[in-house]
Amino acid sequence: MKSGKSGGKVFRDPVHQLIRIAPEDRYILDLIDTPEFQRLRRIRQLGVSSLTFHGAEHSRFSHSLGVFNIAQRIIQSLQLRYGPKSDVYQTRTQYAKIIKAAALLHDVGHAPFSHMLERAFAGTHHEQRTVELICGKQSGLNKALCENQIKPEDVASVVRKDFPVKLVVDIVSSQLDADRMDYLLRDSHCTGVSYGEFDLEWLLHAMCVGRVADGHGSSKSSPKLCLDKRKGIYAAERFVAARLHMYQQVYMHRVTRGFEVLMLNLFTAAAHLAKRQKLPAETPPLVNNYFSKSGKLDLSNFLQFDESQVVAALHVWSHSKGNAYKTIRRLSAAFLSRRRLYGSINLTGSAAEMLKLGEELGHLPKESDGVTQAYGIDTVSDTPYKGMVYRARGDASPEEIINDSILVADPENPESVKPVETASRLLQNMDAEQFVVTRLYFDRERTKMVESIIRKLGIKMEN
Amino acid sequence: MDGMLELLRLINALGKVDGRKKLQKIVYILQSMGYPFPQRFGYLHYGPYSSGLAAEMDSLVSAGLVTEQKRDGGGYESYVYELGADATNLLKELKKTDEPIWATHAVKFNKQDANSLEALSTVIYLRKNGFCGDGLRDRFTALKPQLKKYYESALEAETKLPKPKLSPRAVGTSAIY
């Protein structure tokens, strides 16, 4: 991966084959060469999914490069469609650097195992950490951005989705964004679940820019990323279906979610010990620090905090001796040897039943440390495509619907923007409800007690 | 579905909430004051928004614990949320009929209109993300030109908010991406 004389660079990539960095985009290489970005090599994209899909070992590093690549290809595609004299071209040149930097850096704040650890502690959301890494004066990313005359706050604002130019945010984060396009293709490729595939080349080819009225009595309008209505509809349908299927088949997988619940309970147990300085002495200091401070680490510590640290801690805990460590020993050993300590039940009861169940389960005997719950209720909800949900609810304003839909437009008439589902019979007939899966995971040693609670409350369940 | 019980207590305390947007903003503001609403918020068209909260409200509505009445919201429909018939008994059963610590604040916010709450929650959001002084005003106006006239009063309300005493609780319902 040495840079050539021209100053650009090429990366081999399993999804995009080649990711080219043009000589004028050398700032991207500066960003890649920071410790903050290199750390992503040691964070798995799909957390504990590799326990279910053994191929899912790919990192946030490769995903982030992929998102950068799709963002730059969206920009190129718009450049090909609109000549250098158009407004779109002006917007493109003005914001291209910010868009590409934000695409590359949007996930840089992820904790080990991606989304799992951040669920254990409040205030550790990766987006917040990403913004801190981009804006923090001590950060190498901040330095690299400033040296290349890019305002870190602009990049952070795109990541937070509050940058005032909507077209810029659309490319990095929307219902039709570079992030989603890369993760579906990459996760699909690596898990071997081909449902995530869609026609990327045609989607890119069909991209155009429409104009959406600012609303609220204003006569102005703003550019929005759209698909050419004569070309993009079928590609959009495939894209929505791909996301739906990947959620149901991969991201919400029962076994994966079960190991997440087990790990969350393990983290509760570890945090309880850490706050009393009672984790086993051989626990890596960073992990000790992380748990005793409820996930708050300073920058230099965060840069070293990757999956190798957490796995090292699991090994220590799984071999710890004595009653005080029984819970962390048992749970970490189960994770390392992929033993399914927890059983699971799909819950389909009403909200009232769920609330009663939560109350009853609160009385279930804890794990041997007297603190850690021996169960977890896991709810995952997702909307394959937001526009449909708004339509089903009927209480969204037109601006809100436009803001959160895949849009189509006639490129000859940029004001003709409308949500794709108005032009797609398939999407119109797709189930518009947000789909929700609720599962109760419980320590198998508590099976009889859990079953009697479920029976007592008369809750419906599916196995 | 970690936040459902607290949402139910909120509707119970307020009696009636006029519109989804208002409800979203009230919860966001209470959470930013440090009260234990576990929902995760991002930035959307109307400012801070939680899709998890929307899903939880849907579950409460389909269970009959909360009712929603349609009314005309000026060009599109809007919902008015009220406590459902079975909710009072359920709260009794769960021993959650005491007045929540955040109740007076919530009632006060509920008396304001949706635009004021949108302005206030956007100011809180921007402040949380490091904006201050003219930078805060400029970004607010760029994001919400239509709410310009609410800016000064939102800013004043924001500075008067009591500082958080409690730390927000861990978040349960998860986004995958």
Image (cartoon, rainbow, N blue to C red):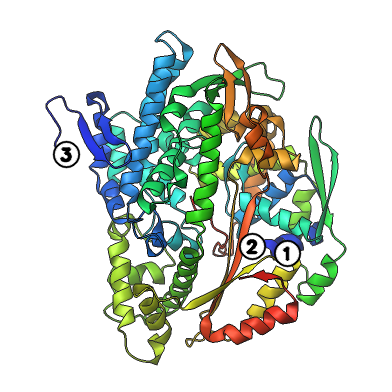
Q: Residue furthest top?
A: A85
Number of dots carrying numbers: 3
Residue at mark 3: A1
Mark 1 or mark 3: whose residue is earlier in sequence: 3
Res B107 visible: yes
Q: Is residue A119 left or right of residue A437?
A: left
Mark 3: few, some, or many residues within 10 Å (few <14, many ≥20)?
few
Q: Is residue B30 above or below residue A196?
A: below
**Residue drawn at (36%, 55%) of the image:** A56
Coordinates of residue A445 in the picture (x, y in percent): 52, 86
Residue at mark 2: B1
Q: Is residue A282 left or right of residue B24?
A: left
Determine the chain carrying the residue at label 3. A
**Residue drawn at (88%, 63%) of the image:** B85
**Residue drawn at (57%, 21%) of the image:** A229
Coordinates of residue B47 in the picture (x, y in percent): 62, 40
**Residue drawn at (30%, 83%) of the image:** A319
Q: Secondary structure at mark 1?
A: helix
Q: Is residue A270 left or right of residue B97?
A: left
Tell me the quarter of the picture where residue B153 sits.
top right
Residue at mark 1: A351
Q: Is residue A270 above or below residue B57?
A: below
Say which mark, if any, is on residue B117.
Answer: none
Determine the chain carrying the residue at label 2. B
Q: Closer to the camera, B102 or B28?
A: B28
Q: Decide: marks 1, 2 in contact (CB < 8 A)?
A: yes
